[in-house]
Amino acid sequence: MRNVILSIMLSLLLLPGCGSMRNMSSEDRVGFGAQVGSFIGWLFGGLIGEAINDENGGEIGAFIGTAVGGVAGASIAASTEEETHIVRRSPKYTPSSHVLLPDLQIEDILLDEDSITYNQKIDAGETCRISFVIVNNSFQDALNVLPVVKLEEGENLELSEPVRIARVTHDTPITYEVTVRASPELQTGTVVFSVRLEEGRGNGTGAETFTVETLGKE
């Protein structure tokens, strides 16, 4: 009789399939697993108990099988949800979030003049400014940053002393200015500047060069 019941119940239990169990809530899944485990434990426990020819073997086996099967069934049902959760999880990355060192860059180099003419040239005797934006493309802060601006080609120009920046973060680009004072002896032509960044832990930038026209007095 137990064999007949077992065959019928196993057929019914296999019909819903794994997809239906995964669609259940966490509580329903655990409860369903416990019930199935208890029933199967009762059947197999009873059959094993009867097989040892003990008068009470069937009842004892059924009792133990029910308890053990219920715990096992609930555990298996709970693990089904965990596996589904892991499979559906997709990692999310933020641009540059994997960078462990500061990633400094120089952007938007501009000439800002005090001259009335605003001719985008450095005039003889004029005081103007070279500005640029310092950007950190990493979530790792850049510390003790020193912008270094040099006159590579040309003469009769004086640059202000560099100023250290304590910290450059990912969220706050910094606009930096260098004052350029042109001597009255400045000649018409072009001059070449270079700009680079030094960082306190050695994570600076290479030098970038740019050319500016000059206008001497006639």
Image (tube, rainbow, N blue to C red):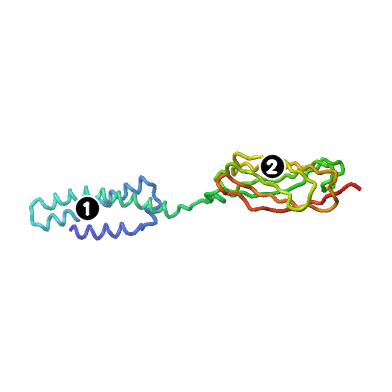
* Residue in the picture at 21% in, 49% down: 66
**Where on the picture, by quarter, is residue 27?**
top left
Closer to the camera, 200 or 96? 200
Task: Indicate whether 3 appears above or below 79.
Answer: below
* Residue in the picture at 66% in, 49% down: 196
The image position of residue 218, as x and y in percent, is 92, 48
On screen, residue 81 versus residue 138, left or right, reads left
Hey, what amino acid is under mark 2?
Answer: Tyr
Closer to the camera, 217 or 21? 217
Locate the N terminus and report the quarter of the image it occupies: bottom left
Q: Nearer the viewer, mark 2 or mark 1?
A: 2
* Residue in the picture at 10% in, 57% down: 52
On screen, residue 92 versus residue 187, left or right, reads left
On screen, residue 34 versus residue 24, left or right, reads left
The image position of residue 117, as x and y in percent, is 87, 44
The image position of residue 6, as x and y in percent, is 23, 58
Q: Which label number is shown at residue 104?
A: none
Closer to the camera, 129 or 51? 129
Hey, what amino acid is under mark 1?
Answer: Gly
Q: Which label number is shown at residue 176?
A: 2
Q: Could you give the CA–CA distance between mark 2 and mark 1, rounded to whole angstroms?
A: 76 Å
The image position of residue 214, as x and y in percent, is 83, 50
* Residue in the picture at 13% in, 54% down: 49
Give the mark count.
2
Per the image, the residue denoted by label 1 is 41
Q: Earlier in the sequence, mark 2 or mark 1?
A: 1
Q: Residues within 10 Å of mark 1 (few under 14, many from 20)?
A: many
Give the structural element (helix, strand or loop) at label 1.
Answer: helix
On screen, residue 25 versus residue 52, left or right, reads right
Closer to the camera, 85 or 64? 85
Give the structural element (helix, strand or loop) at label 2.
Answer: strand
